Image (cartoon, rainbow, N blue to C red):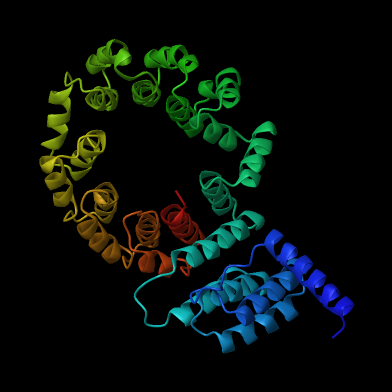
Amino acid sequence: MSRSTCRILLLVAAVSGAVSAQQPAQPPRLPGAIPAEEATLLVNGYAFLAQGNYQQAFNKASEARSLFPRSVAVLTFAVEVEIARGGAKAGLDLYESWLGGRTLEEPAMLRRIVIASLREFVAQTQDGISRDAALWALVEDGDPAAYQAVFQAAQTQDTGAIRRLAARGDERAVGALIDGGLMTMRTPNAHATMLSLGESRSPRVIEPLTRKLTDPEAGIRGTAAEALATAGGAAMIGRIKPLLADQSSFVRASAAGALFRLNDFSGMSVLQELLASDIAKGRLRAVQLMASRPDAAWQATVRGLLQDPDPNTRVEAAGLLADHDAVSARAALEQLSSDPNPAIREKATRLMARDLNAPLPVLRRLLRHDDWLTRVHAAASIAALTRPA
C-alpha cells in the first residue's frame, strides 16, 4: 500500500469517527418491545383504516391475529376494524369471541366499543329518548362534538337541552329558563325546569324559585322547596320552613325532606309519620326524602320495602339501595327483570344498567338487551367506569 493510499484511509477513518461522535448510537432494542413484524403490520393496517380501505385493513388484522394471537395491540386493531366495517355490535362480537371464558375484561377495549355504540345511538333517528341519553353520556365523557350538538340544540329552543345545560351551570341556559316563561307552565316541564335551575346553583335562580313557594299548585310549591335547597343550601332554611305548615301533605313532606338535606330537622315529625305509614308508598316517599343520610336505620327500611308485594315499590327501593347494598339491590333487580309486567321489567333492567357498582361483565351483557335505553345506560356506565383519570 502506497503512502498516499494510507493517508486517504486514515482521513476516511477520521471523518467516520467524527460523524459517529456527532450521532450517538441507538439504544439496543429491549426484549419487551413489540416485534418489528407486528409493529409493521399494525402501522400498515391503521393506514388502510384511516384511508377507509376496510378490506385491506381487515386483511392486515387477520394476518396479524394469525401471527400474534395473544397480542392485545393486535386485538385492539382488529376490534377497530370490525367497528368500522360492521358497527359496535361487530366489535363486541369479536371482543367476546376473544374473551371466551376469561374472567378479566380489557377495560380500554370495552370502552372503545361502548363509545362507538353511543355514537351510533346519537346518529339514529328512530328513538329520540335513546338518542338524547346517548348524547348526554358523550357530553359527560368530555366529547366536544357532543357538547357542541347540545349547545346547537339549545339555540333552537330545545327545552330539554336547555335544562340539561342549565343543570351543568351554563348561565346562558339558566337565563333562558328564567326569561323564557317555562316556569309558568302547568306541565311536568315546570317541575323539571325548577329542578334544573336548582342544580345550576346559580344565584340568579333564588328569587324566581322563592316566588314559586306560594304557587297555587301544591306540586309546584313542593318542587320549589326541593330546588331551593339544592340551589342555595342552608341559607334557604328560613324560606323553606314555613311550608311545614302548608295545607298539602305533599308540600309538607317536600319541605321536610329539603330541610333534612340541609341538616335542619324541623320537619322530622312529618318524615317519621311517613316512615310509620301502613302504606308502602308512604314509607317509600320517606326514604326517598331522607336518602341524603343513608344510615343503618334508613337502609333497614329500604330493605324492608324490597319485600313489598307491589313490584313498583320493590324496584324503586332497589334503585335507592344500589349505592349502599349493591348485592341486595342487584338480586332484587335481577328478579324484577323477569316480572310479568313489561314496564317493571324495563325499569329494573334500566336501573341495573345505570348501576356504577355493577361488574363490567354484567354491564357488558346488557349491551345486547332488547331495550335500547337499557343498552345506552349500560354503555354510559361502562364509559364512566373506564374513563381515564
Residue 7 sits in quarter: bottom right
Is 386 placed above or below 113 here?
above
Please identify the quadrant where the N terminus is shown.
Answer: bottom right
Q: Residue furthest front?
A: 3
Residue 289 sits in quarter: top left
Q: Toward the viewer: 80 or 160?
A: 80
Taking the spot 85% from the left edge, 74% from the top edge, the residue there is: 8
Relative side of 63 to 170, left or right? right
Taking the spot 33% from the left edge, 66% from the top edge, the residue there is: 340
Residue 98: image x %, image y %?
48, 81
Is 55 placed above or below 156 here?
below
Residue 62 sits in quarter: bottom right
Taking the spot 89% from the left edge, 76% from the top edge, the residue there is: 4
Residue 115: image x %, image y %?
55, 58
Taking the spot 21% from the left edge, 23% from the top edge, the residue there is: 263
Q: Toward the viewer: 196 or 145?
A: 145
Residue 101: image x %, image y %?
37, 82
Residue 311: image x %, image y %?
26, 56
Q: Toward the viewer: 199 or 58?
A: 58
